[in-house]
């Protein structure tokens, strides 16, 4: 799959839903309230690292993709990254649950791409109907600086390589 977005492009506008971290969410009885993040407004002037996965809690995403971003959080911050976000097609409650399970607190935003609308604009949707997953976000990573794409890579296979924390850090 080849993304339609490329380095130098301005990212398309769009809306993610998510549940911002608050200490009440440390109680697993709390659900939180989904809110919206608007790309053009919330990421204006920010350096953003975004990686997308086909599904919260799925094996590669859960074991290989997200944890290195958590472990290398301080390295991303030292490179001037304002926002780290993981995106998937799961709803905001599932994404928040994944973040809470992983102890992300407010370090990494867990964003839902409703109906894969934003990733489709980048040519980065993935048909996983054969697995009964429907349409998902591909496994990809972006570096966005003041809404301009500095890095975009999509995984050619099922492994985490070009979209992993190590590869992205090397391009910051
Ligand atoms: C994974 O291993 O991350 C995965 C497995 C099945 C569908 C999507 C993702």
Image (cartoon, rainbow, N blue to C red):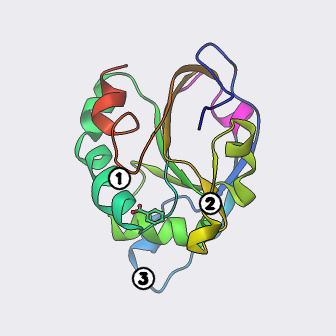
Residue 101 in percent (x, y) is at 36, 71
Label 1 to label 2: alpha-carbon separation: 15 Å
Indicate the position of residue 32 as horizontal and vertical percent values. Answer: 58, 72
Marks 3 and 2, how far apart at CA: 22 Å
Q: Nearer the viewer, residue 38 or 95?
A: 95
Any mark on residue 28, and which?
A: 3
Where in the image, quadrant-wise, is ligand 1 located? bottom left
Q: Residue 166, relative to residue 107: is it above or below?
A: above
**Viewer-side label of 3, 2:** 2
Pick whichever of labels 1 and 3 is earlier in the sequence.
3
Give percent across and percent down for residue 3.
Answer: 63, 32
Asked if the magenta segment contains residue 45, the reply would be: yes
Q: Nearer the viewer, residue 15 or 156?
A: 156
Q: Residue at x 69, y 28 (%)?
A: 4
Range shown magenta: 39-47
Q: Residue at label 2? A: 89
Mark before the other along the chain sequence, 1 or 2: 1
Quadrant in which the N terminus is drawn:
top right
Q: Quadrant of residue 136?
A: bottom right
Query: Is ligand 1 closer than 8 angstroms to the Cβ of mark 2?
Result: no
Q: Are marks 1 and 2 in contact (CB under 8 Å)?
A: no
Residue at 29% over, 48% down? 70
Label 2, residues with CA under 10 Å away: few <14, some 14-19, many ≥20: many
Residue 62 image offset from top left, x and y in percent: 35, 62
**Within 10 angstroms of label 1, few (less than 14), some, or many (20 or more) residues?**
many
Label 1, secondary structure: give it.
Answer: helix
**Element type where label 3 sits in the image:** loop
> Which residue occupies the foreground of this view, 119 or 75?
119
Q: Which residue is mark 1?
A: 66
Q: Is residue 49 left or right of residue 137?
A: left
């Amino acid at each position: 799959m080849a993304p339609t977005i490329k380095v130098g492009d301005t990212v398309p506008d769009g809306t993610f839903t998510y549940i911002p971290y608050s200490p009440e969410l440390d109680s697993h009885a709390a659900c939180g309230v989904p809110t919206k993040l608007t790309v053009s407004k919330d990421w204006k002037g920010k350096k953003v690292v975004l990686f997308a996965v086909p599904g919260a809690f799925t094996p590669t995403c859960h074991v290989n993709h997200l944890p290195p971003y958590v472990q290398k959080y301080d390295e991303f911050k030292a490179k001037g990254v304002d926002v780290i976000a993981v995106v998937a097609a799961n709803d905001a409650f599932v994404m928040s649950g994944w973040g809470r399970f992983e102890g992300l607190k407010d370090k990494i935003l867990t964003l839902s791409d409703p109906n894969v609308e934003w990733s489709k604009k980048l040519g980065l949707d993935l048909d996983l109907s054969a697995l009964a997953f429907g349409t998902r976000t591909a496994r990809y990573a972006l570096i966005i600086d003041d809404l301009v794409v500095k890095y975009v890579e999509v995984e050619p296979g099922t492994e985490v390589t070009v979209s992993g924390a190590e590869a992205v850090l090397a391009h910051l």
